[in-house]
């Protein structure tokens, strides 16, 4: 049985005041032991503060990106070793916003995946098609290509203890989530695609859905057999909605 996993991606939002209030409220609302892994990914500059504020809670700490190098002359970057040093457990890589605004390639993202595995951090690999690709019927081809970049570089076993987040770009921040049936079909495709190489790896890999998940649509999405949780943007910035999404995941997977 896969344990559901709900992660909040704060993106470029927040302040010390906001992080303090949001984490304190989440700790209160999610204080009982949940049969669901929970993580928040604040901006890099607030990670250390968040770690201390989360201290002793069941909420894990995620980062939103990582550099491919562990140390050296790479001005402005943050290494996997540093993230691990301050208590990060999960790192989002390949988010469509980084693929788009920072021109990140599949190959670069596979290198980030590799450095996270080497360091003992859990990659949360974002994949997903644009609206144009969706309309052209290329959803499966795009997802397969983005996964294959990692498999080709590292082998399918790299997906042991890793997370995939299927985030159709047209659903991110638009309020227009994929329907549960649409998302399930792609999640099943992703799991089957991995199963072609290893059914054991496919069975245990966590596949989150991301894209306009909120407290209203979460339960229906989580009711799908291959949707193991969510990567939540906007709705993770409010304790009420994020906690409701966590509770929906736990309920659905009982
Ligand atoms: P929204 O939940 O705001 O659509 O963002 C999804 C996302 O990109 C999470 O990484």
Image: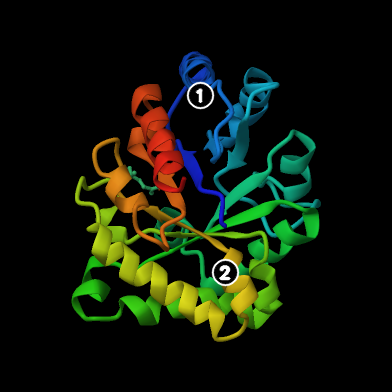
Q: Is residue 99 left or right of residue 212?
A: right
Q: Is residue 62 visible?
A: yes
SS assignment at label 1: loop
Specify which label sits upstream in the sequence, 2 or 1. Answer: 1
Residue under label 1, please give it: 30
Residue under label 2, please give it: 203
SS assignment at label 2: helix
* Residue in the image at 65% along x and 77% along y: 156
* Location of residue 200 with respect to 56 vertically, above or below: below
* Residue in the image at 41% along x and 58% along y: 227
* Residue in the image at 45% along x and 36% along y: 10
Quarter of the image with the N terminus is: bottom right
Q: Position of residue 122 (x, y in %)?
A: 66, 53
* Location of residue 120 with respect to 21 vertically, above or below: below
Viewer-side residue, 250 vs 28: 250
* Location of residue 77 with respect to 20 vertically, above or below: below
Q: Position of residue 83 (x, y in %)?
A: 71, 41
Q: Residues within 10 Å of mark 2 (few under 14, many from 20)?
A: some
- The image quarter in which residue 182 lies: bottom left
Q: Given the current orientation, which residue lies at the most extreme bottom position?
A: 196
The total number of labels drawn is 2
Q: Given the current orientation, which residue lies at the most extreme front position?
A: 254
């Amino acid at each position: 049985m896969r344990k559901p996993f709900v992660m909040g991606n704060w993106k470029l939002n927040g302040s010390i005041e906001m992080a303090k209030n949001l984490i304190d409220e989440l700790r209160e609302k999610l204080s009982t032991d949940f049969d669901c892994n929970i993580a928040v990914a604040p901006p890099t500059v607030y990670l250390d503060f968040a770690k201390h504020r989360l201290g002793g809670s069941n909420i894990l700490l995620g980062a939103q990106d990582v550099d491919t190098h562990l140390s050296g002359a790479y001005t402005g970057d943050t290494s996997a070793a540093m993230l691990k040093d301050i208590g990060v457990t999960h790192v989002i890589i390949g988010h469509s916003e980084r693929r788009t605004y920072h021109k990140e390639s599949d190959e670069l993202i596979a290198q980030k995946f590799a450095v996270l595995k080497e360091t003992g951090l859990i990659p949360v690999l974002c994949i997903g098609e644009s609206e144009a690709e969706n309309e052209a019927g290329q959803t499966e081809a795009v997802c397969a290509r983005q996964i294959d970049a990692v498999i080709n570089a590292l082998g399918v076993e790299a997906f042991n203890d890793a997370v995939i987040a299927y985030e159709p770009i047209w659903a991110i921040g638009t309020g227009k989530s994929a329907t549960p049936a649409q998302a399930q079909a792609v999640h099943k495709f992703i799991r089957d695609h991995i199963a072609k190489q290893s059914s054991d790896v496919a069975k245990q890999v966590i596949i989150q859905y991301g894209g306009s998940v909120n407290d209203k649509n979460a339960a229906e999405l989580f009711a799908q057999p291959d949707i193991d949780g969510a990567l939540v943007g906007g709705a993770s910035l409010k304790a009420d909605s994020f906690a409701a999404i966590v509770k929906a995941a736990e309920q659905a997977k009982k």
